[in-house]
Image (spheres, coloured by chain):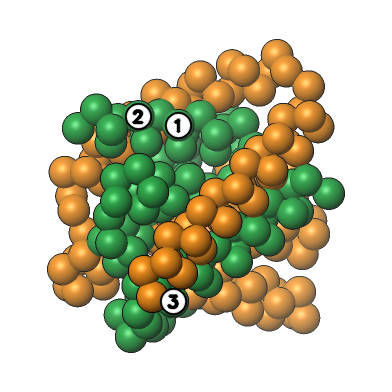
Amino acid sequence: MGVALLAIGLGLLAGILAGLFGVGGGILFVPTLTLGLGLTQLHAEASSLLAIIPTVVAGTWRQQRYGNVRWRAAIVIGLAAVGGVEAGVALAESLPEGVLERLFGALMLVVAAQVAWRAWRRG
Amino acid sequence: MLQLVLIGVVAGFFSALFGVGGGIIVVPLLLLLGRWQERPAMATSLAAIGIIALAGTISYGFHGELKPGAAALVGLPAAAGAIAGTALQQRLAGRTLSLLFAVMLAVVGIKLVV
């Protein structure tokens, strides 16, 4: 019961972040499903994708009402991403994981600094 | 158009490689490469993720990896959260959204590096 409540609470938080920043919520879904509900990593990543669907449907529905969604761009990005996933899976199976994760983490930090710098300069 | 295709391919590629959501890649690319404003960038990212998640779910579903009960337990409260999150987003300045988003990116980056 306590674990279920925790999962619901973390799900709610993931949804708020998803709506606020336009991300899916997978960052919080996956650890909630593995550490909280005891799913394997594979089952958690699969079920996280399923959980993302109601999250983004609700968020996109509201954003549509606010007039922020550009559908053509969304469809182009989404379909292109499905192609990119295939390439990513192929590469993931042939390269050392630890090194890649660190490089990607470092890239995220650089991007974070750039996004913050752009916003800062504008103010 | 070419830029949007590029953004999509890069997002799908990295999300498959590292198990991060596509949004964490789509949003900064739309902001920095496409020079979009925050709200349309984040809203459009959300819609694009819907397509990515649907394709992924179908693929995993065929392999029998889905746990619908567990997904509903986090996904349904998240749908309510997303409505609150988008409402909150309309009240914040674009600049504030960028700065908060940068903090979240940095947290994810540090988590991957460490």
Residue in the picture at 64% in, 73% down: A10
Chain A colour is orange
Residue in the picture at 75% in, 53% down: B111
Q: Are marks 2 and 1 on the same chain?
A: yes
Write down the chain letter for disc 1.
B
Write down the chain letter for disc 3.
B
Between the C-alphas of marks 2 and 1, the distance is 6 Å
Q: Are marks 3 and 1 in contact (CB under 8 Å)?
A: no
Which quarter of the figure has residue B9? top left
Q: Are marks 2 and 1 in contact (CB under 8 Å)?
A: yes
Q: Is residue B31 left or right of residue A103?
A: left
- Quadrant containing the N terminus of chain B is top left
Q: Which residue is mark 3?
A: B96
Nearer to the camera, B68 or A16: A16
Q: Which residue is mark 2?
A: B6
Q: Are marks 3 and 1 on the same chain?
A: yes
Nearer to the camera, B83 or B111: B111
Q: Are marks 3 and 2 in contact (CB under 8 Å)?
A: no
Under mark 3, the amino acid is Thr
Q: Is residue A68 left or right of residue A9?
A: left
Q: Which residue is mark 1?
A: B10
Q: Position of residue A96 (x, y in %)?
A: 78, 22
Q: Which chain is green?
A: B
Q: Which residue is the extreme one toward the front?
A: A121
